[in-house]
Image (cartoon, helix red, strand yellow):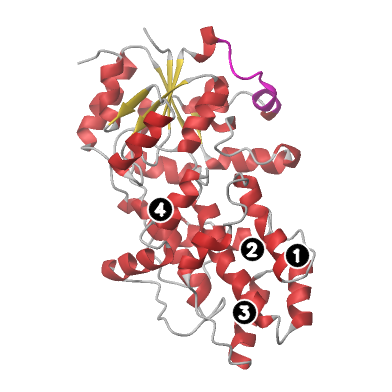
Amino acid sequence: MIYDLVLFDVDGVFLSEERCFDTSALAVWELLYGSHFLGLSGEHFTVNPMEEEIRRIRREVFCDDQVLTWMKDRGINANWDMVYLTFTVQLCLMLRDIKKVEEEKVTLWLREGIDENALRECGSLMRQHRLSFQPNFKNFLHFFEENEAKLNRQELLCYFNSFSKQSLDVDTRQFSRNSDLWKIGHSVFQEWYLGEELSTQVPRLRGKKGYVYQEIALAEPENIRYTIEKLKKQGIGLGIGTGRPTIETEIPLKELGLYDYFEEDRIVSATDVVEAEQEYPHYAPLGKPGPFTYVKGYLTKQSTVEECVQLSLPLPPNQGKRILIVGDSVADYLAARKMGCDFAATLTGLTGQAARSKFEELAADYILNDVTEILDIFDID
């Protein structure tokens, strides 16, 4: 047997990321145009956009997915981070305009943090002073230009502190993954994706139906089930390491009839990562491209955070080479390499077949057109 354990990502492997990307775009749109946030003029905001409108919003917000590709290439794999980065670029450019007429107010926000009240006040000041700011999402592709080659995921999330110092002349440390602003983006995404029935928070607006039940499989569901069942019958351990929260992993995989094939103790989600970061903030960030998610899947969820973080990596070949990690992104590849594990890239992620050259350049151990081709690795019919 080549491998004893296979750890799978979910998005781009089993499930299309399309609905998550749609949801991210809608969250950014709400933050900009919803009257309960900035309330910018020039666009209509609704909690029930038609499919054609969703397509238009996503094309605009992510510049025909150029912004998504840029972020994925730099290890930004969580939709919450995507919402935060995309929205905060526009917000920072807006604050630069507002500062010309309300310097004290902008300085206060930057030093004390930007919460929902600050966003509403920001929009109110825009209208009061008749400032003509309109989002230009293409600005995102140039915002980090001078430093982007040097910035890793964590540095990107905190980059707005540097922007504040350089362009707004205000020293701040308020921009981070633990900030109120990041948490606002996170909660708005969750409202869109889960809808009212599943959301654990009081909805800001009624009427969001949720996209979690509308997920799209990346191969025929029966073919995926056949594949996973064959691996299971060979005695291979099966686990998951995903940037999705637990509920967003369970529901669609159960809908596809896949969830029960995986060992419960090896299903590791963003929920586990967030809980670990909250309990041990000095270890943060623990998400991909860091290896924590897959290390936890390897050691099982019975292991402690310290055991996962302090595990000596890369694993010795007699351990690491018995584990195969399957993912669609560079972040998954980097996590696998840090662990000393082999990596199978699926070409069903955001860029599809165009990702082949990238994974060839990275020397991925296997490149699969879709996850069902994993049976060829094990020589299983």
Q: Amino acid at mark 2?
A: Leu
- What whole-number distance in Å separates the C-alpha atoms at marks 2 and 3? 13 Å
- What whole-number distance in Å separates the C-alpha atoms at marks 1 and 2? 18 Å
Mark with earlier residue (1, 3): 3
**Element type where label 2 sits in the image:** helix
Horizontal side of 237 relative to 162 (left or right) equals left
- What whole-number distance in Å separates the C-alpha atoms at marks 4 and 2? 20 Å
To which residue does mark 3 refer? 120
In the picture shown, does residue 276 fall above or below 82?
above
Q: Which quadrant of the structure image shows residue 312?
A: top right
Question: Magenta segment: does it hold 307?
Answer: yes
Q: Position of residue 132 (x, y in %)?
A: 54, 87
Q: Quadrant of the N terminus?
A: top left
Q: Could you say which is closer to the camera, residue 256 or residue 31? A: 31
Q: Residue at x 50, y 37 (%)?
A: 331
Q: Residue at x 52, y 59 (%)?
A: 83
